[in-house]
């Protein structure tokens, strides 16, 4: 199986291809080395909803990896002196490089089978694949297209063409979305949806009594509309009510009064009736006052 072949290739480091079946397993193993880096465990996972972006990066990675062998393929064709043998090897090679250019950054490949059919392109490649020089020119042309597409994807991601930079009279520049471009309308709709969700979240946080704070969020790096966004996040700090503060202050005052009464009681009790100026029945009166104070504080705490 493919998993047994992959285990053998990873453990031994040497593989011998003796049959067509072995070659198919080897291709599966090499492809797995690429799509396994992007978190996929099986190839069918790339077709599942939500994995489109990662699957497209896997697809482009495979195309770039295949281009590593382009020079070796051209060197091999230079050693073929028989014209029939050369055509037999060169035509599939030129068709392959054209297919790689068609598949690069093309999400349609995950929806249906795609082939090179535009402007009778296969017949054009067959007629030109007659010598190493012509094949080399074909390879260079399609490699440049792949490179151009990669640069274009990078540029559109970081500096979208539907966003125009307008300079004002004072020299300041501002970004303006082209409303006549379909991508601009999609962007405006997404921004409106995000703003509505942010407002809804803010209202929910206020209802739950959660304090808000502003956090500046860095964008995705596009330099136009991805930076400078501000969102609000809940701190998770509960507001302290006035009633709770009054309860805490009342409890603190009660502790202080009780402590003072205990100190006075101990001083009088330890001093005895021999202290000058002592009046009979003073102990009983002070004890009664302390008892009344304790009862009043307890009732006050109960009312709070």
Image (spheres, grey):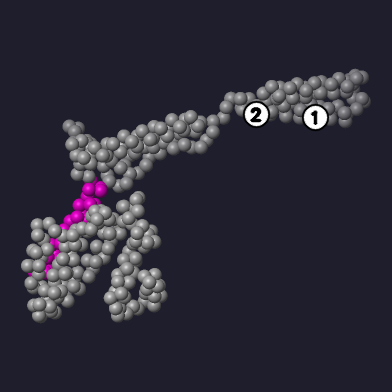
Quadrant (top left, top right, bottom left, bottom right) of the N terminus: bottom left
- The answer to whether the residues at label 2 and label 1 have Cβ atoms under 8 Å apart is no
In the figure, residue 15 lies in which quadrant? bottom left
Instruction: Determine whether the residue tagged by mark 2 lies in a helix, strand or loop.
Output: helix
Label disc, if present, on residue 7 of the rendered structure: none
Badge 1 crowding class, 10 Å Cα cut-off, few under 14, some 14 to 19, many 20 or more, is: few
From the top left corner, tell me how far across and down residue 77 is, in percent.
Answer: 14, 75
Picture coordinates of residue 71, whole percent (x, y): 18, 71
Question: Is residue 276 inside the magenta stretch?
Answer: no
The answer to whether residue 123 shows anywhere in this view is yes
Q: Give the quarter of the image for residue 172.
A: top left
In the foreground, 209 or 6 = 6
Which of the marked residues, 2 or 1, is nearer the chain's N terminus? 2
Between residue 67 and residue 219, name the one nearer to us: 67
**Residue 180, position in %: x, y?**
18, 36
Secondary structure mainly formed by the magenta segment: helix
Q: Residue 152 lies in magenta, yes or no? A: yes
In the image, 79 versus 271, the foreground residue is: 79
**In this rendering, position of residue 69 left or right of residue 6:** left
Residue 163 appears in the picture as rendered: no
Q: Which residue is mark 2?
A: 248
Q: Quadrant of the C terminus?
A: top right
Residue range in magenta is: 134-159
Marks 2 and 1 sit apart, C-alpha to C-alpha, by 23 Å
Q: Is residue 287 left or right of residue 69?
A: right
Q: Secondary structure at mark 1?
A: helix
Residue that carries the numbered disc 1 in the rendered image: 263
Q: Closest to the observer: 246 or 184?
A: 184
Compared with 296, 190 (above or below) is below
Above or below, 40 relative to 220: below
Tell me the residue at 25%/48% (across/down).
157
């Amino acid at each position: 199986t493919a998993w047994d072949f992959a285990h053998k290739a990873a453990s031994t480091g040497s593989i011998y291809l003796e049959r067509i079946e072995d070659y198919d397993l080897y291709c599966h193993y090499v492809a797995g080395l690429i799509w396994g880096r992007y978190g996929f465990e099986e190839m069918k996972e790339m077709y599942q909803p939500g994995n489109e972006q990662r699957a497209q990066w896997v697809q482009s990675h495979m195309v770039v990896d295949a281009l590593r062998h382009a020079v070796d393929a051209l060197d091999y064709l230079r050693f073929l002196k028989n014209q029939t043998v050369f055509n037999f090897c060169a035509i599939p090679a030129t068709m392959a490089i054209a297919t790689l250019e068609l598949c690069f950054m093309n999400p349609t490949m995950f929806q249906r089978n795609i082939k090179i059919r535009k402007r009778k392109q296969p017949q054009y490649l067959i007629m030109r694949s007659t010598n190493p020089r012509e094949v080399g020119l074909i390879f260079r042309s399609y490699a440049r297209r792949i490179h151009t597409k990669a640069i274009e994807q990078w540029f559109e991601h970081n500096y979208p063409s539907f966003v125009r930079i307008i300079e004002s009279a004072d020299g300041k520049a501002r970004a303006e979305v082209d409303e006549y471009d379909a991508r601009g309308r999609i962007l405006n709709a997404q921004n409106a949806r995000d703003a509505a969700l942010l407002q809804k979240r803010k209202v929910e946080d206020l209802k739950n009594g959660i304090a808000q704070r502003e956090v500046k969020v860095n964008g995705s790096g596009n330099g136009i509309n991805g930076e400078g966004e501000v969102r609000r996040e809940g701190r998770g700090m509960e507001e302290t009510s006035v009633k709770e503060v009054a309860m805490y202050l009342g409890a603190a005052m009660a502790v202080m009064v009780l402590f003072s009464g205990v100190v006075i009681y101990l001083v009088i009790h330890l001093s005895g009736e021999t202290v000058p100026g002592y009046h009979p029945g003073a102990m009983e009166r002070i004890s009664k006052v302390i008892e009344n104070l304790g009862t009043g504080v307890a009732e006050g705490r109960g009312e709070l």
